[in-house]
């Protein structure tokens, strides 16, 4: 081999600066690939937004008309309708009309009372309060309870909720408007029970 042959081979070799840049690019590419691929393994079951608050294995909910111990007509129907609307608006679930759904949300209005808070000098009510208590049960197809609250032991796998509505006739309110307010509050409480514990 001649010296010119060695000189041409040396000329084809990249300089130290070029080799250093290539090495840096390889390391940077490895880090970027690792940074991109690492989260993909952990995000397989990750959910974003409000859907992350609810059990992922439930897609449909059947809500039969709630039972009622109240003497007020149609109160159970109003509550059931409000709950269905609240589920559709606030959760990722679809309300269906068949008991073969992924879950069943049932309940019973146990108390419905009205009491006078303030009277005028002629004993006419100036402010009254309506109170409503509801027992709720949410189970999956197997009959397992979904809204378990381990911190508070409840009999018969029921959750007992209570809410109220206020009637002030001077402000144009009636018993019906107070009932509607109480029903909307109760529906929001019931649907909030459907969230998974933190």
Image (cartoon, rainbow, N blue to C red):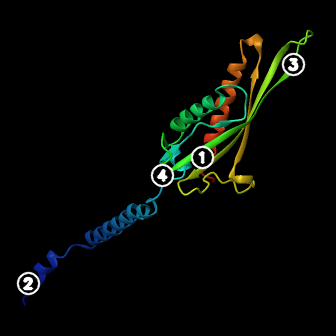
Residue visible at 84% across and 15% down in the picture? 125
Q: Is mark 1 on a helix, strand or loop?
A: loop
Q: Earlier in the sequence, mark 2 or mark 3?
A: 2
Residue visible at 41% across and 61% down in the picture? 40
Q: Residues within 10 Å of mark 2 (few under 14, many from 20)?
A: few
User: Circles 4 and 2: CB distance less than 8 Å?
Assistant: no
Q: Earlier in the sequence, mark 4 or mark 2?
A: 2
Q: Which label sits on residue 194? A: 1
For this rendering, which residue is in front, 91 or 34? 91
As displayed, is residue 46 above or below residue 107?
below
Residue visible at 66% across and 39% down in the picture? 189
Question: Where is mark 2, residue-wise?
Answer: 5
Q: In which quarter of the image is the N terminus?
A: bottom left
Q: Picture coordinates of residue 160 (x, y %)?
A: 73, 44
Q: Is mark 4 on a helix, strand or loop?
A: loop
Q: How far apart are marks 4 and 2 (CA)?
A: 64 Å
Q: Which label sits on residue 47? A: 4
Q: Earlier in the sequence, mark 2 or mark 1?
A: 2
Q: Earlier in the sequence, mark 4 or mark 1?
A: 4
Q: How many numbered marks, from 0 up?
A: 4
Q: Picture coordinates of residue 52 (x, y %)?
A: 53, 50
The residue mark sitting in front, 4 or 1, is: 1
Question: Where is mark 3, residue-wise?
Answer: 118
Q: Which of marks 4 and 3 is nearer the N terminus?
A: 4
The residue mark sitting in front, 4 or 3, is: 3
Q: Picture coordinates of residue 94 (x, y %)?
A: 47, 41
Q: Is residue 7 left or right of residue 191?
A: left
Name the residue furthest top: 122
- Occupied quadrant, residue 106: top right
Q: What element carries label 3?
A: strand
């Amino acid at each position: 081999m001649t010296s010119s042959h060695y000189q041409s081979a040396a000329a084809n070799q990249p300089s130290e600066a070029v080799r250093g840049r290539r090495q840096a690019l390889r390391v940077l590419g490895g880090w970027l690939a690792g940074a991109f691929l690492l989260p993909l393994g952990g995000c397989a079951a990750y959910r974003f937004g409000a859907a992350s608050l609810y059990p992922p294995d439930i897609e449909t909910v059947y809500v039969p008309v709630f039972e009622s111990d109240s003497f007020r007509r149609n109160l159970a129907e109003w509550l059931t309708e409000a709950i269905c609307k609240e589920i559709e608006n606030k959760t990722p679930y679809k309300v269906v009309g068949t008991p073969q759904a992924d879950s069943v949300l049932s309940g019973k209005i146990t108390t419905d009372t009205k009491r006078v808070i303030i009277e005028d000098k002629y004993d006419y009510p100036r402010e009254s309060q309506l109170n409503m208590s509801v027992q709720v049960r949410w189970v999956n197809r197997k009959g397992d309870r979904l809204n378990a609250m381990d911190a508070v032991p409840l009999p018969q796998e029921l959750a007992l909720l209570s809410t109220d509505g206020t009637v002030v006739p001077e402000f144009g309110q009636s018993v019906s408007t107070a009932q509607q307010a109480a029903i909307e509050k109760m529906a929001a409480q019931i649907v909030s029970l459907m969230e998974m514990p933190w």
